[in-house]
Image (cartoon, rainbow, N blue to C red):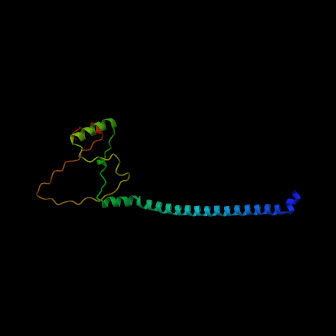
Amino acid sequence: MLDNLLHGRGWIAIVFVLLAGIVFFNVDLLQMNRDIAATAEAAGEIKRENAKLRTQIARLGSSERIQRVAAEAGLVLPAPGEVRYLRSNPAVDARRAAARIEEGAATAPPVSPEPVADEPVVAEAAPVEPVTSEPAPVVPEPVTTTDPALTPVGQ
C-alpha cells in the first residue's frame, strides 16, 4: 500500500496539500506583518501627537503666560495679609447655608478656600485717581473669616 501511495496519485495529493499549507501559512504571515506595520505606524503618529500636545501644555501652563493673561483680565495678586483660609465643618456649614438661603442673605459671592498663588508675583500698582472735592462713595469692606463656625448668621 505504501508503495502504491508513493508511486501513484496519492503522492501528488500529499505534495499538493503540503504546498497549499505552506502557501496559506506564508499568506497569513504576510498579513500579520502588514498589521504589525500598520499598528507601528499608528503608534508613531500617536507619539508625535502626544509630543505636540506636551509642548502645547508646557507653553500654555507657563507661569509667565498665566500671569500675563490674568493681568490682561484685570486680576491682581492680593497682599500677603489679605489671604485667609477657611476651615470646613460640613455638618455646621450645611445647616448655616440652608438658614442663610432661607433668610435671603446668601447673596455674597463664595470665598475660594484655595490659595491664589504659590509664587510671589510683582503686579503693577493701580493708577491713582486725582483728589476731587466730591465725597467718595462708601464701599463696604468684604467680610472674611478664618472659621465659618465663628461667623454670625447675618454676615
In the visual, does 9 lie left or right of 100? Answer: right
Q: Which of 14 and 36 is in front in this view?
A: 14
Say which residue appears at 66% left-offset and 64% top-offset: 30
> At which x and y percent is residue 71?
31, 59
Pick the residue in front: 34 or 17: 17
Q: Can residue 10 be seen in this view?
A: yes
The percent position of residue 145, horizontal first and vertical second, equals 27, 42
Q: Image quadrant of residue 28?
A: bottom right
Q: Residue at x 27, y 39 (%)?
A: 98
Rendered position, 2 above or below 106: below
Q: In this view, does 12 lie to the left or right of 93?
A: right
The residue depicted at 11 percent of the width and 57 percent of the height is 134
Residue 4, horizontal then vertical, whole percent? 87, 60
Q: In which quarter of the image is residue 84?
A: top left
| Near-viewer residue (13 or 23) | 13
Quarter of the figure with the C terminus: top left
